[in-house]
Image: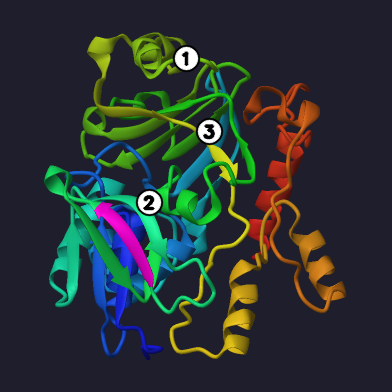
């Protein structure tokens, strides 16, 4: 891969995005100096991402790590939707897509903690790439002015020592509470909305096969809505590990959410299991944020591009072209009418459509956008089956 005159890059955040970016940038020729900074003391092992779709699979292949991911992970086949009483509503069999193997882009399950360990190991093999833990970004000294030719960060290291780091580019990969985003766009400039209801994610060893449950199910219920997805297949069903993520009441503290977990499992899971019938490996609450900054790139460092090339690249970076989904046919028709796609804009959700700040609207079986869930689901499945 050709290097557009980049000599140094700082990546803030040593999670999956930051580590994968570093691994891909390490293939540039000539290779720039790459520094990854993270405020944490080590890798984050909280239960987070587990399922990776085709865009991620393509990047894993490009980074040279797909073979190990496919070897140690697994590809789920059957996905379905159920009522709280376990009644199967509908579903589909992904094995019919024949998208496995190293050339296929099929959905793959691989724990994010394991992915981060794999990425860190591969990054450390590359010369000119360093990962620095316990390094907290506290300020942005330069880089926002269009005249700046580099960007500088103020970083607090171990023992509270402050150091300035400078590079051609600084990339923020530091998550939903991104410090880099706040320094670039301001503390409160984050358009969109956040769900009022929290979600609790758990990795749980439990036998759900005895109830005839499939690789992944989404349970539809106004109170006990949750996902149960097999993330660790084992010959002994009692040793299977499931990602069980469920919605909770708004306004609860993290401590209260953890205290309610046993009660939630007993009320919502098949067989109403007691704590002695399962083992939770780890659990963590989180919030869903449907937000996006107005621009992904700011500042004056242009990596060797002319001003005109840089302006054009900025426009391309900020455009968002949806290809599939519930409104796939409408999107294609709109793109056919317009000479160029419009820049991506966040749609603010107000009124009844955002009632409760969660996934469901006030009408039974209707989503927060007031669309009927099962009608839209049928359209999506038809689109997938048609190769759209």
Cβ atoms at labels 1 and 3 below 8 Å apart = no
**Residue 382 visible from this viewpoint:** yes
Q: Does the magenta stretch include residue 291?
A: no
Taking depth in this image into account, of 72 and 48 the one nearest to the observer is 48
Q: CA–CA distance between discs 3 and 2?
A: 29 Å
Q: Residue furthest right?
A: 337
Query: What residue is at 74 percent from the left and 29 percent from the top?
Result: 366
**Cα distance, mark 1 to mark 3?**
23 Å
Q: Which of 13 and 357 is in front in this view?
A: 13
Q: Main structural element of the magenta stretch: helix, strand or loop? A: strand
**Of 323 and 278, the residue lying toward us:** 323
Question: Mark 2: few, some, or many residues within 10 Å (few <14, many ≥20)?
Answer: many
Q: In the image, residue 182 lies at what x, y percent?
A: 48, 49
Q: Check disc 1 and report the residue beneath it.
A: 252
Mark nearest the camera among 3 and 2 is 2
The total number of labels drawn is 3
Sequence order check, earlier mark of 1 and 2: 2
Q: Which residue is drawn at 68% across and 43% down?
A: 377
Q: In this view, does 262 lie above or below 19?
A: above
Which secondary structure lies at badge 2? loop
The answer to whether the residues at label 1 and label 2 have Cβ atoms under 8 Å apart is no
- Nearer to the camera, 381 or 310: 310
Q: Mark 2 points at which residue?
A: 174
Q: Look at the image and tell me whether residue 173 can be seen.
A: no
Q: Is mark 3 on a helix, strand or loop?
A: strand
Could you tell me which secondary element the residue under label 1 belongs to?
A: loop
* Percent x, y of residue 51: 40, 49
């Amino acid at each position: 891969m050709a290097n557009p005159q980049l000599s140094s890059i700082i990546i803030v955040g040593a999670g999956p995005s930051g580590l994968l970016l570093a691994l891909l940038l390490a293939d540039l020729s000539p290779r720039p100096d790459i520094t990854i900074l993270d405020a944490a003391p080590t890798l984050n092992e909280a239960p987070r991402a587990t399922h990776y779709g085709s865009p991620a699979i393509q990047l894993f292949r490009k980074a040279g790590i797909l073979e190990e991911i496919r070897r140690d992970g697994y590809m789920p086949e059957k996905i379905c939707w159920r009522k709280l009483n376990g009644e199967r509503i509908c579903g589909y069999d992904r094995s019919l897509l024949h998208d496995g193997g190293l050339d296929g882009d099929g959905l793959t399950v691989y724990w994010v903690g394991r992915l981060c360990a794999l990425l860190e190991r591969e990054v450390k093999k590359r010369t000119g790439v360093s990962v620095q833990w316990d390094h907290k970004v506290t300020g942005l000294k330069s880089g926002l002015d269009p005249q700046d030719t580099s960007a500088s960060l103020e970083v607090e290291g171990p023992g509270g020592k402050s150091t300035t780091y400078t590079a051609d580019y600084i990339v923020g990969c530091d998550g939903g509470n991104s410090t880099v985003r706040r320094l670039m766009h301001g503390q409160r400039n984050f358009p969109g909305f956040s769900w009022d209801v929290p979600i609790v994610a758990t990795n749980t060893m439990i036998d759900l096969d005895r109830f005839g449950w499939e690789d992944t199910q989404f349970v539809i219920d106004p109170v006990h809505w949750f996902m149960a997805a097999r993330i660790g297949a084992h010959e002994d069903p009692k040793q299977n590990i499931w990602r069980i993520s469920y919605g909770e009441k708004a306004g609860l503290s993290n401590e209260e959410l953890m205290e309610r977990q046993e009660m939630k499992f007993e009320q919502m899971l098949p067989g109403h299991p007691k704590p002695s019938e399962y083992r939770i490996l780890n659990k963590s609450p989180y919030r869903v944020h449907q937000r996006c900054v107005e621009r992904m790139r700011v500042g004056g460092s242009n990596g060797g591009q002319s001003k005109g090339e840089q302006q054009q690249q900025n426009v391309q970076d900020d455009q968002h072209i949806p290809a599939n989904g519930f409104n796939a046919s409408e999107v294609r028709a709109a793109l056919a009418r317009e000479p160029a796609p419009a820049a991506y804009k966040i749609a603010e959700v107000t009124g009844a459509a955002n009632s409760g700040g969660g996934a469901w609207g006030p009408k039974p079986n209707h989503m927060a956008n007031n669309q009927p869930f099962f009608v839209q689901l049928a359209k999506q499945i038809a689109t997938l089956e048609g190769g759209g």
